[in-house]
């Protein structure tokens, strides 16, 4: 699909763990982007995804990295302050991702329904956790099929 969308860290981590639903969601979008915070979280999590593999992944999908500017930081500070007063609280990295989406008028693709809510949030699938170390039942909510984006070398998995 056309249009820039903002991927949250958890979808990219799911891809690195081999969840087909994450690949299907990534393949759906023609113009994926991540916040500089997501980039930092992924590079900082070397145990999750090795750097050369991450670099190849970023290039193959053509991710745009959205830098954090003063407008985004002011919006993030406002989100943190508002959530501190009215709850639930939000961590600064998530506030920066939300602010990036708000300032740039982007949809956030995430599984994090605790911190991200509202009109500009898409939850493409859910993971059911049966223990702290085991995840099962990877099912996208609803019946909406996800079509591969045009020109992608990555195809939907069945």
Image (cartoon, rainbow, N blue to C red):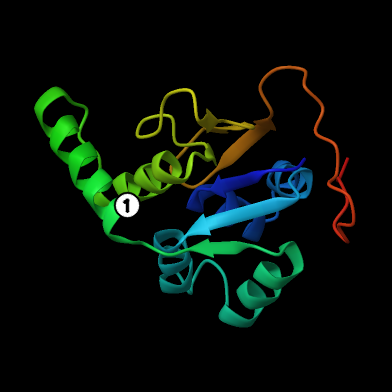
Q: Position of residue 149 (x, y in %)?
A: 83, 47
The residue at 49%/53% (across/down) is: 9
Report x, y in % for residue 78: 19, 40
| Picture mark count | 1
Q: Can residue 109 be seen from the camera position used here?
A: no
| Residue 114 visible within the image | yes
Residue 117: quadrant of the picture: top left
Hey, which residue is sitting farthest front in the picture? Answer: 71
Say whether residue 119 is left or right of residue 148: left
The quadrant of the rendering that contains the N terminus is top right
Viewport quadrant of the C terminus:
top right
Q: Residue furthest left?
A: 85
Q: Spot the residue most to the top.
A: 142
- Residue at the spot 63% in from the left edge and 36% down from the top edge: 136
Residue at the spot x=62%, y=72% of the render?
Answer: 54
Q: 76 left or right of 117? A: left
Q: Is residue 25 above or below residue 41?
A: above
Residue 140's x, y, as percent? 69, 28
Q: Name the residue under label 1.
A: 72
For the residue carrying disc 1, how many other residues have a C-alpha within 10 Å: few (<14), some (14-19), or many (20+)?
many
- Between 70 and 27, the residue placed more toward the observer is 70
């Amino acid at each position: 699909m056309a249009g820039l969308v903002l991927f949250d860290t958890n979808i990219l981590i799911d891809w690195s763990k081999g969840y087909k639903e994450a690949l299907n969601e990534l393949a759906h979008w023609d113009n994926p982007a991540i916040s500089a915070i997501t980039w930092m979280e992924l590079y900082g999590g070397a145990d999750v995804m090795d750097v050369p593999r991450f670099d190849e992944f970023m290039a193959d999908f053509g991710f745009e990295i959205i830098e954090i500017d003063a407008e985004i930081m002011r919006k993030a500070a406002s989100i943190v302050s508002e959530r501190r007063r009215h709850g639930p609280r939000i961590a600064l990295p998530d506030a920066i991702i939300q602010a990036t989406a708000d300032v740039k008028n982007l949809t956030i693709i995430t599984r994090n329904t605790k911190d991200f809510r509202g009109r500009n949030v898409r939850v493409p699938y859910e993971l059911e956790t049966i223990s702290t170390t085991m995840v099962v039942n990877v099912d996208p909510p609803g019946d909406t099929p996800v079509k591969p984006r045009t020109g992608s070398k990555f195809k939907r998995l069945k």
